[in-house]
Image (cartoon, rainbow, N blue to C red):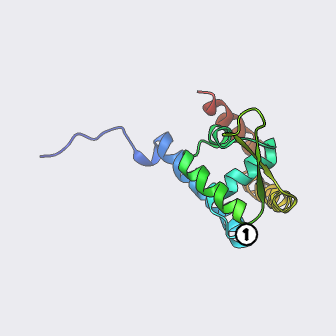
């Protein structure tokens, strides 16, 4: 039995394209933080979030990163073992801890920010300034969907 040709093309399907492009771009930067610091993607996201926003609770990190709370918990534990973050107990509620980067954590964050800027430039050079801006604008718009 011959099936009717569908107009659907998986390789042109936007979620499929976005996923594969995102993975390719993300893996390129992953090689940098993995090789330099032997970090996982979750550890990088937690470190970057604390570096970007300052002291946060684990729940706030979950909100900022979109990571599952168990991944945040594991990443926090690992980063804390490296002495890159410290817990500060909330004086009003002893059950709540704010997490903040130590000077060593700030140093690692700054180093990876510089690498991130260089990686972003590499992608920008590949796409060209106009396409890079257009893509960034469209992705920002899609994130507001």
Q: Is residue 62 left or right of residue 80?
A: left
Residue at the top extreme? 145
Q: Which residue is mark 1?
A: 37
Residue at the left extreme? 1
Q: Nearer the viewer, residue 31 or 87?
A: 87
Q: Is residue 123 left or right of residue 117?
A: left
Task: Answer few, some or many: residues within 10 Å of disc 1's Cα (few below 14, many 20 plus, some between 14 and 19).
Answer: few
Q: Quarter holding the C terminus?
A: top right
Q: Is residue 141 above or below residue 132?
A: above
When asked about the image quadrant of residue 43, the answer is bottom right
Q: Residue at x 61, y 50 (%)?
A: 72
Q: Residue at x 49, y 42 (%)?
A: 15
Q: Is residue 25 visible?
A: no
Q: Position of residue 57 (x, y in %)?
A: 70, 41
- Report the number of discs: 1
When asked about the image quadrant of residue 39, the answer is bottom right
Q: Position of residue 144 (x, y in %)?
A: 63, 28
Q: Residue at x 66, y 55 (%)?
A: 76
Q: Position of residue 97 (x, y in %)?
A: 71, 43
Q: Nearer the viewer, residue 80 or 67?
A: 80
Q: Nearer the viewer, residue 40 or 114?
A: 40
When asked about the image quadrant of residue 126, the answer is bottom right
Mark 1 residue element: helix
Q: Is residue 3 above or below residue 85?
A: above
Q: Residue at x 57, y 55 (%)?
A: 23
Q: Is residue 143 above or below residue 71?
A: above
Q: Position of residue 92 (x, y in %)?
A: 76, 32
Q: Is residue 33 left or right of residue 13?
A: right
């Amino acid at each position: 039995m011959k099936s009717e040709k569908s107009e659907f093309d998986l390789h042109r399907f936007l979620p499929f394209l976005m996923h594969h492009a995102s993975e390719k771009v993300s893996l390129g930067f992953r090689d940098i933080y993995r090789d330099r610091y032997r970090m996982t993607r979750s550890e990088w996201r937690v470190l970057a979030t604390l570096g970007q926003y300052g002291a946060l609770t684990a729940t706030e990190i979950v909100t900022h990163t979109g990571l599952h709370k168990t991944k945040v918990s594991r990443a926090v534990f690992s980063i804390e073992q490296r002495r890159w973050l410290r817990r500060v107990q909330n004086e009003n509620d002893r059950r709540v801890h704010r997490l903040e980067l130590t000077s060593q954590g700030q140093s690692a964050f700054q180093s990876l920010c510089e690498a991130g800027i260089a990686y972003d430039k590499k992608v920008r050079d590949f796409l060209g300034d106009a396409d890079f801006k257009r893509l960034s604008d469209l992705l920002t718009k899609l994130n507001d969907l």
